[in-house]
Image: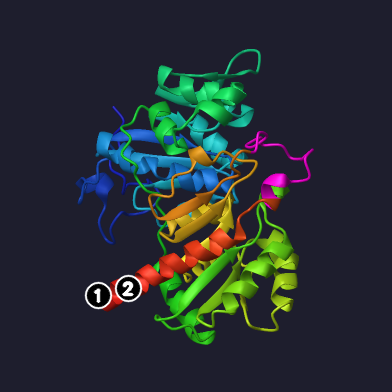
Amino acid sequence: MTKQPPECKNFTGYKPCFPNYNCWENGCKEMNPIGTKILIINLDAMGDVLMTTAQLHAIKRKYPQSTIWWLTLNNAKDLLVNNQYIDKILTYDSESLSILQSMEFDIVMNADKSLRAGSVTMNVKAAKKLGFGINNYGQIIPLNSGAEYNYKMGLDDNLKFKINQRTKQDYLAETFELDYKRDKYIFNFTEEEILFIEKYKNEIGIKDSDEIIGFNTGCSLLYPNKKMTIEQHIALIEKFLSFNRFKIMLLGGKEDQERNSIIADAFNNKVINTPVNEGVRKGACYESIPQVVITGDSFGMHLAIALGKYVIAWFGLSCWTEIDLYDNGIKLIPEGLFCAPCWKKVCPYNLECIQMIDLEKIVNETLKYFDMRKHEKTKN
């Protein structure tokens, strides 16, 4: 009978697990059991990928001895780097799909209601499949009873827009048959990134005592109507600068470069316009610096939540009930607006939900937060 490799996470079959030690011949030197083999599939928006990391806590509570593989898109893979619960990150490409077809898992958890994610779920060998797959007609289907509420949310606008009061983490935990304890997102900096953050702060003259407000000014190109106007941002920043106590940082992705330049130019070097084209990890480094992040419902909002920032988020077309700020921020919602939320890419009502964003409330809530911090520091 052919000798079997040890069921140990350290063993790859390619090189020694430890220098000058042959596990194949001499047995495992330091067993790190594979345990329950789990594949998470999450190919959707980057913010959703960050949000799904919250489920890892419950997965490890239920399956403490387990190995977790995660399949995602190339633009989201860096969000999962240095995550203590993820053993292997795969990107959605032909090589990864070929590898997965050669493996067998105990559990597949698919968070996405999409044909490509459903196809992968159906093709991967696993004893148990949770979340969503596709049938012979190419229709997306729920694979377990726990996924049914999540599934209905996509089919019933009244349920999604008017009735539902559950956060996405709540009903995704139900989809994956996990206990829900309001677990937080997981995003960890590397030691090199922590050093970079400190170096950057020194370069731009930021001290630990500074009160810093970050403006995540944009959103993805998929839903461009999630963002405030440039004029609204300028009006807010003018107000904050008038207090002579705050430093302002402009944050965003590469799609926000022109918008941020226009905003920065209005203030003649009085705001910090962070680079937006250095990748998601560097973007996270910059967003880690402000104590408050003002943002729409975008990836930048999810990143701010993951970084533990005080988040002031406005909503219009998207569902504010699905977002958990973990009691560390406020949501500005369009009260009494019959058409919101709607998830429309083109607005027939002249973006009334954006026009009615309460700028004065944003200022007041920001002042309240920083005054509270100052009071707590003096008290201690």
Q: Is residue 339 magenta?
A: yes
**In the rendered image, is residue 280 in sight?**
no
**Which quarter of the figure has residue 360?**
bottom right
- What segment carries the magenta color? 337-354
Residue lying at 54% horizontally and 79% vertically, measured from the top left: 243
| Near-viewer residue (341 or 101) | 341
Judged from the image, the secondary structure of the residue bearing numbered disc 1 is: helix
Identify which amino acid the numbered label 2 is placed on: His
Across and down, in percent, residue 40 comes to 45, 36
Q: Left or right? Give the position of 191 relative to 155.
A: left
Quadrant of the frame with the N terminus: top left
Reading the image, the residue beneath label 2 is 375
| Near-viewer residue (167 or 65) | 167
Residue lying at 67% horizontally and 65% vertically, measured from the top left: 233
**In the rendered image, is residue 20 in sight?**
yes
Residue lying at 56% horizontally and 35% vertically, measured from the top left: 97
Identify which amino acid the numbered label 1 is placed on: Lys
Above or below: residue 99 compared with residue 212: above
> Does the residue at mark 1 contact the one at mark 2 (Cβ under 8 Å)?
yes
Reading the image, the residue beneath label 1 is 379
| Near-viewer residue (236 or 342) | 236
**Chosen colour scheme:** rainbow
Q: Main secondary structure of the magenta part?
A: loop
Across and down, in percent, residue 11 comes to 32, 47
